[in-house]
Image (tube, grey):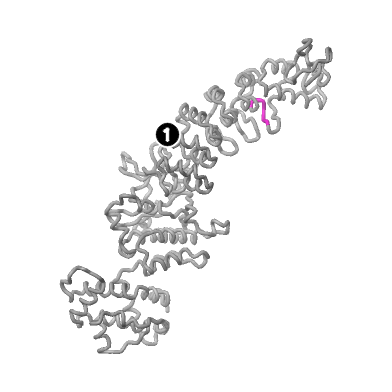
């Protein structure tokens, strides 16, 4: 309020003339503003009063009053920010005064490209955040819509963060070439829980994930049920992958695509080129790493060889028959899990942690049964698979964290024998220093074939009596192991020598039974075969391959932890005792 010195009438602050007598505000009790230089004649309290008056006039959108006031004092205060309010251009944009914006630009000479506040916003940022569609439509053609503020956000991203769906739609539709990367916008919308904008973005574009958890995991972290439901409704799978990760390239045919934020694209390409050089230097060891082939035409999506079906979709219905056969085998028969473990081991040998091991980045080829591991750039593992020390903010050993995440992947797969559970539990031990190294993981007996297990048993039984491993083996007990033998087999057990109830005696018995296989009656081999529950008849019990499979299968069924117990006690037999 100000009082007229002529008639003492009270007037509102934005008005420059008295509503009663028409006298100009220059003759008032609270602000005598001389028609002179702003800096030259005003006292400090006059400067403060003038700035406050200018702010009120800009907020009110009174162009005529501002023009008169500028002519009376100076335009200089308009380009100086009012603390949190920003410059006059910021104030006019926030209050949706388009004529005032044009006056400030065309008459005062302010630039639409200038930063108008401490956040480094432009006028377009401010108007987009506030949802002023007409103002945005008027000024957007004259500015760079890709300009970012201190938060790294464009005006479109600010509109996403504030759920201004009309602004987002206008900017994307009007400037499509400036909005090739929608992933960052969707991530901003998820992070801000902006449901209207997110729904619009999802309805207009396929859900392209840069990795297994970019949108999905953030929604889970926020514990936002509505966002999660919205993502699921628009085709996002629980693994965080879109339903159409495969596309066709004119030069490379079918490829696997992975979306990466435009700001990260150069670094991502260099990362994968470096990894590709490592693969080429030792191709025989890296067949299980998904091979990078290049980028798409827009240089916005990474392309890889098609690796097969992600383990995250193993439970999809219907599951392809060949894939079902792969996942229905034991871990030693179905090689895909071992291939994936070998790929992680190779990365670790070369000083490279993976950092994002999860079912969505692990694949199985349903035709060959082989496994593949996709290495992602700056990936992060879903919380459910992340090592506990990472979730608690502790110092993280990335290699031990990889072991934990892989252990969780293995634990989610079918065929969990006692050996498999032993390995998975070891890998997911809460204490990182108690987890195995990847060299130990790939050496675990769970991956061994029946033939390899029998060879391991034979090697132990062949040690001399004073060997240190024999002493350790004799400390292991397997009470009443002879009672697990079929009666016809048991009858001939002690004919030539006596066996006690130690594990070492069992080991020697298995070795002797195998090496003297041709001396056993057909009834004994048939009894072992029948004990396995096999329905197929035996063509020739004297066949060495049949005898090996029959004996190995029986030992695995009757003594499921024997080889594991031996390996735990004796370790790798190639290592020093």
**Residue that mark 1 sits on:** 204
Above or below, 487 relative to 124: below
Q: Is residue 321 left or right of residue 338?
A: left
Q: Write the residue at 47% across / 44% down.
A: 228
How many numbered discs sit on the rendered protein? 1
Above or below, 68 relative to 570: above
Nearer to the camera, 510 or 455 = 510
Q: Write the residue at 82% across / 25% down.
A: 43
Above or below, 510 relative to 220: below
The main secondary structure of the magenta stretch is helix
Q: Is residue 307 visible?
A: no
Nearer to the camera, 204 or 48 = 204
Q: Is residue 462 left or right of residue 229?
A: left
Residue 442, given in percent of the width and then of the height, sits at 39, 65
Q: Is residue 574 left or right of residue 198?
A: left
Q: Write the residue at 19% across / 68% down.
A: 536
Residue 88 is inside the magenta segment: yes
Disc 1, SS? helix
Residue 225 is inside the magenta segment: no
The span shown in magenta is: 85-89
């Amino acid at each position: 309020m100000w009082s007229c010195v002529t008639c003492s009438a009270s007037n509102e602050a934005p008005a420059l003339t008295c509503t009663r007598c028409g006298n100009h505000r220059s003759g008032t009790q609270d602000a005598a503003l001389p028609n002179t230089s702003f800096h030259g004649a005003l006292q400090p309290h006059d400067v403060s009063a003038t700035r406050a008056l200018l702010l009120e006039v800009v907020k009110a959108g009174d162009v005529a009053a501002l023009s008169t006031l500028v002519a009376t004092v100076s335009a200089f205060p308009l380009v100086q920010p009012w603390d949190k309010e920003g410059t006059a251009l910021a104030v006019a944009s926030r209050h949706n005064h388009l004529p005032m914006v044009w006056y400030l630009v065309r008459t005062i000479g302010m630039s639409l490209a200038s930063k108008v506040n401490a956040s480094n916003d432009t006028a377009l940022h401010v108007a987009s955040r506030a949802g002023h569609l007409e103002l945005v439509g008027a000024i957007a053609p004259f500015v760079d819509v890709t300009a970012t503020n201190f938060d790294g956000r464009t005006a479109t991203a600010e509109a996403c963060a504030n759920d201004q769906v009309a602004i987002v739609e206008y900017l994307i539709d009007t400037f499509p070439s400036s909005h090739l990367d929608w992933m960052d916008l969707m991530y901003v919308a998820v992070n801000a829980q902006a449901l209207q904008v997110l729904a619009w973005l999802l309805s207009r574009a396929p859900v392209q994930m840069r990795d297994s958890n970019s949108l999905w995991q953030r929604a889970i972290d926020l514990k936002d049920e509505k966002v999660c439901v919205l993502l699921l409704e628009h085709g996002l799978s629980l693994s965080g992958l879109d339903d159409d990760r495969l596309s066709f390239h004119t030069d490379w045919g079918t490829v696997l695509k992975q979306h990466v934020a435009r700001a990260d694209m150069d670094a991502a390409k260099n990362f994968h080129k470096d990894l590709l050089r490592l693969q080429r230097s030792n191709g025989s060891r890296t067949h299980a790493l998904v091979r990078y082939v290049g980028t798409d035409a827009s240089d916005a999506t990474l392309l890889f060889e098609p690796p097969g079906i992600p383990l995250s979709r193993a439970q999809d219905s219907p599951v392809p028959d060949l894939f079902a056969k792969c996942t229905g085998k034991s871990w030693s028969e179905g090689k895909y899990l071992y291939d994936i473990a070998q790929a992680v081991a190779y990365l670790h040998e070369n000083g490279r942690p993976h950092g994002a091991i999860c079912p969505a980045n692990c694949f199985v080829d349903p035709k060959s049964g082989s496994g593949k591991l996709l290495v992602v750039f700056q990936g992060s593992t879903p919380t459910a698979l992340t090592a506990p020390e990472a979730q608690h903010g502790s110092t993280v050993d990335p290699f031990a964290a990889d072991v934990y995440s892989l252990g969780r992947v293995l634990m989610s797969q079918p065929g969990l024998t006692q050996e498999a559970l032993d390995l998975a539990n070891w890998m997911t031990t809460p204490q990182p220093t108690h987890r195995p190294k990847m060299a130990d993981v790939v050496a675990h007996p769970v991956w061994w074939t029946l033939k390899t297990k029998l060879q391991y048993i034979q090697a132990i039984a062949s040690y001399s009596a004073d060997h240190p491993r024999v002493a350790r083996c004799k400390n292991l007990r397997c009470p009443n192991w002879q009672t697990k033998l079929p009666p016809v087999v048991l009858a001939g057990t002690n004919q030539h020598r006596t066996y006690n109830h130690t594990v070492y005696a069992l080991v020697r018995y298995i070795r002797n039974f195998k090496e003297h296989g041709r001396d056993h009656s057909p009834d004994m081999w048939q009894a072992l075969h029948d004990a396995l529950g096999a329905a197929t008849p035996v063509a020739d019990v004297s066949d060495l391959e049949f005898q090996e499979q029959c004996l190995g299968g029986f030992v695995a069924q009757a003594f499921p932890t024997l080889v594991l117990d031996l390996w735990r006690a004796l370790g790798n037999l190639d290592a020093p005792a």
